[in-house]
Amino acid sequence: MPGSVANAAPSTVLPQFLCSAFQESREIALRGNEYKNGESQRALQVASSRRQWSLTTRLPAASMDALRAFFLARRGSLEAFYYYDPFAVTSVGSNWDGTGASATGRVTVRFAAGAWEQSMGIARADVAIRLVEVN
């Protein structure tokens, strides 16, 4: 059908050394109107919430290079990939699969737009990135 958008088709997995450092949050998209008398109207725009993960960490040079290469290979927020949520299983961190074949705890995500922030120090780099669930 013309004008259709294809579903995300991930072909790679976020490296394991990053999977356990994320903080999860949820966002529910609302449409709202605020009126002068203080009243408001709100309506859901989606059926369920969208999960997001954020990471702010200090990495050694080799890990930073690996993360930057992964980010650039996905062309920022353009391509989706798999993220294995280590807290989605009873034994924390036991679900990572480098092939992406295992569905246990696997989430299809992309980098959030404008998600890369970096600062350099002596022998270490601080980086902040965000992942957004792709439904």
Image (cartoon, helix red, strand yellow):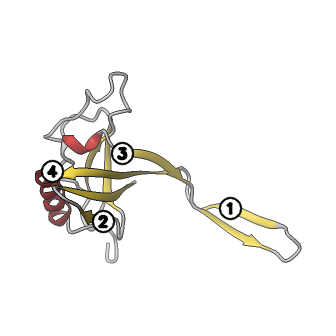
- Earlier along the polypeptide chain: callout 3 or callout 2? 3
Q: Which mark is residue 22?
A: 3
Mark 2, residues whose alpha carbon is within 10 Å: few (<14), some, or many (≥20)?
some
Q: Which mark is residue 43?
A: 1
Instruction: Residue lying at the far front in this picture: please name it.
Output: 122
Residue 113 rendering spot, x and y as whole percentages = 36, 69
Q: Amino acid at mark 2?
A: Trp
- Earlier along the polypeptide chain: callout 4 or callout 2? 4
Residue 14 rendering spot, x and y as whole percentages = 21, 48
The residue depicted at 35 percent of the width and 53 percent of the height is 56
Mark 4 secondary-structure assignment: helix
Image height check: is 101 above or below 40?
above
Q: Nearer the viewer, mark 4 or mark 3?
A: 4
Residue 34 rendering spot, x and y as whole percentages = 76, 72
- Earlier along the polypeptide chain: callout 4 or callout 3? 3
The answer for how far apart the CA atoms under marks 1 and 3 are is 30 Å
The answer for how far apart the CA atoms under marks 4 and 3 are is 15 Å
The answer for how far apart the CA atoms under marks 4 and 1 are is 43 Å
Marks 2 and 4: in contact by CB < 8 Å?
no
Marks 3 and 4: in contact by CB < 8 Å?
no
Q: Nearer the viewer, mark 1 or mark 3?
A: 3
Mark 1 secondary-structure assignment: strand
- Earlier along the polypeptide chain: callout 2 or callout 1? 1
Q: Amino acid at mark 3?
A: Phe
Q: Nearer the viewer, mark 2 or mark 1?
A: 2
The residue depicted at 28 percent of the width and 45 percent of the height is 83
- Earlier along the polypeptide chain: callout 1 or callout 3? 3
Image height check: is 51 above or below 103?
below
Q: Amino acid at mark 1?
A: Ala
